[in-house]
Amino acid sequence: MNQQICYWCGTPVTKKSREHVPPLNLFPEGHRKNLITVPSCPKHNGDLSMLDERFRFVVQAGNETEISQQVFTQKTLTRLKREGHRGLFNNLMENSFDATLNGKRTIGFRINAQQAFLYFEKIVRGIYFHEYKEPFEGSITSASNYLPHPKQDLKVIIRLFDSCSSDMIEAKSENPEVFKYWHGRIKVNGHPAFAMVSRFYEETFAFSVGIPNGV
């Protein structure tokens, strides 16, 4: 039996046990060319499937590109209304509220920040494994333009990434209209770190920094 190790925890897994990075449900048909997959244990694959479903809804609903809105209304919203997903759908609706964005009336959603950052962490760890062929051993911190963090100034984070942009690599993207990323090993206050910028549906960005253990 051909064994590999989980992208997150390093546990031995079979060759068939793999996780899409980012989750497959973000990619509509016709936009699934050469998707990234990494070996994964059950805990860091199936156990996080509901997290993937919840944030597919959030990421797609928060974008206005034609692709994101099409897949959101035709697939995501319909799927959430089915039996087995009613609880998630009802929870999202209960946490919705009227909002205004760029002068337009829309709907906002109160979301669990801890779960949102776990969603980004999962993607960052998967990409790190894909690029460097080993799990990242350390902590991951993320910020997003659609999910402000009360203790983080997004402008400061963007300036940090701008300052180290020359050390980051623009990854080849087969489906840039859905997902694109930049990554690199950088220095933060003189210490080694890993940085990644993720872009979803051309409008939502996540800025992530990984600090190795012992730093």
Image (cartoon, rainbow, N blue to C red):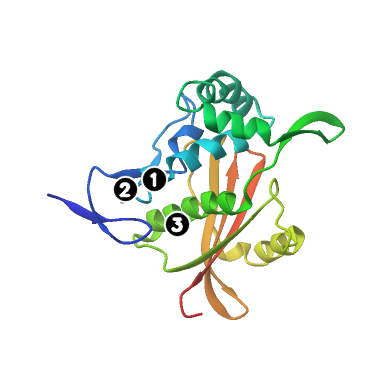
Q: Secondary structure at mark 1?
A: helix
Q: Is residue 139 left or right of residue 47?
A: right
Using a 10 Å C-alpha cutoff, classify the residue at mark 3 as few (fewer than 14 neighbours), some (14 to 19) or many (20 or more): many
Front residue of 139 and 202: 139
Q: Residue furthest right?
A: 103
Q: Residue furthest left?
A: 1
Q: Which residue is mark 2?
A: 42
Please report contact status of discs 2 and 1: CB closer than 8 Å, yes or no.
yes
Q: Residue at x 56, y 50 (%)?
A: 115
Q: How many marks?
A: 3
x and y, in percent, of residue 79 in the image: 50, 23
Residue type for callout 1: Asp
Q: Which residue is mark 1?
A: 47
Q: Is residue 212 above or below residue 116?
A: below
Q: Residue at x 54, y 40 (%)?
A: 179
Q: Residue at x 69, y 42 (%)?
A: 110
